[in-house]
Amino acid sequence: MTSPVLIVEDRLLSTDEIVNTLEQMFRRMEMMDVLCGQNFPLYSSGENSDWSVSPGGSWMGGFWAACWWLRAKMTGSAGDRQKAGEISQRLFRKLTADSGYRSLIFWYGAALGEIWLQNAPARELTHSSIAALAHSFDPRLNCIPLGMAMGGLTTGSCAISVDNFASLIQLLCFSREKQYHRIAQCHAETLLAACRGDKGAFHAEASFDGHEFQVKDRAGVWSRGQAWAMLGLSRAAAQWGEPYLSQARAACTYWRDVHKGNLPRNRPDQTEDVKDPSAVVIASLAMLSLARLLPDETSWCKYAHQQISTVLHSPYFTVINPDSAFGSAGLFQGCCYRTRQNREEIVESVWGNFFLVAALAVLAGLIDPYDC
């Protein structure tokens, strides 16, 4: 698949542009809701195509609730709050899933409802998910393994991944129980030892072979994996300081030096020029968080603003298309995703939409970067 030609502007998004974009993306949520009904939207490969949906949401379901939690926080609408709560409660069935991705589901799908709106059912679901997730801690591996459900496959019981690094720390440390904080820190220590490469680059995943964790890929060769690692390190640094703060700065520096402000390829080591703008958005959230921890280094905040502006000024984001029957304003078709076993496509996804909305809200000063 060939990526569109990019016309990148250096101009930073203004506050008015950010607010207008948020309004467009909120309207797009309404269209998605009509198309998907009681199912969870996963991804769509085009503005007029059907959404791939799931009755349970897979690992993405929490992001659909998160979109509505954030919308409710910003609009103050009782209807939006009710919608978010209804979606959140439908995630209950994932509590017992054999997957470390439960942290993605319940941090975004439930905990944000408690943080932003003090929603009592979301609070109860959050604490149930914390206990369930912590129960999966494997002392032999010193981490919560990826598990065999929702993409973990047969190796999941002995694997650790950067994808859920940030959400696992945030969810477990949201509890007041110190035992859960200790589990989160053990997991972070294991992931750092298993997946950290040289000069701030990270491997996406590692598997325990009975003696030690082994990696299969070269560090830094998956752009979104590097971004996930950056986000997780920023959360670990906020919780525990060093060595995570130094590692977060190194990982962000690696990103900046390798990509030099451009939209990254999904796999920088491959010749196929498939971009992944969603990786930029996640990486930018990590940098906005790092800037909070290093107040004398405001360059990270400016760089993140530039990166998000580049995404919004690129062909991957549609501001308005009056010829579209579906109304494509607010369409972020910038997520590289494996839609089939051997096929990766640029899609619109529910998690990509949430992270972009969240990043814009952070830039506008509407939410804290540590809530995303």
Image: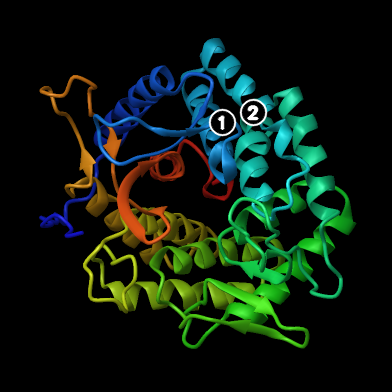
The residue located at (61%, 57%) in the rendering is 164
| Corner quadrant of residue 236 | bottom right
Residue 129 is situated, as x and y percent measured from the top left of the image, at 77, 42
Residue assigned mark 2: 88
Quadrant position of residue 356: top left
| Local crowd size for mark 1, using a 10 Å CA cut-off: few (<14), some (14–19), many (≥20) | many
Q: Is residue 271 above or below residue 287?
A: below
Residue neighbourhood size for the residue with mark 2, other residues' Cα within 10 Å, grouped as few (<14), some (14–19), many (≥20)? many
Percent coordinates x, y for residue 15 in the rendering: 29, 37
Horizontal side, residue 187 vs residue 30: left or right: right
Label 1–label 2 contact, CB within 8 A: yes
Q: Would residue 292 appear left or right of 180 to someone viewing this image?
A: left
Residue lying at 82% horizontally and 54% vertically, measured from the top left: 134
| Residue ID at (85%, 75%) | 140
The answer to whether residue 151 shows anywhere in this view is yes
Measuring from the top left, give residue 69's x and y in whole percent.
55, 28
Which numbered circle lies on residue 250? none
Which residue is the site of mark 1? 65
Left or right of 263? Residue 40 is: right
Q: Residue at horizontal 77%, vertical 84%?
A: 210
Q: Measured along the vertical axis of the image, is residue 310 above or below residue 43? A: below
Q: Cα distance, mark 1 to mark 2? A: 5 Å
SS class of the residue under badge 1?
Answer: helix
Amino acid type, residue under disc 1 in the picture:
Ala
* Lower sequence index among marks 1 and 2: 1
* Amino acid type, label 2: Ser
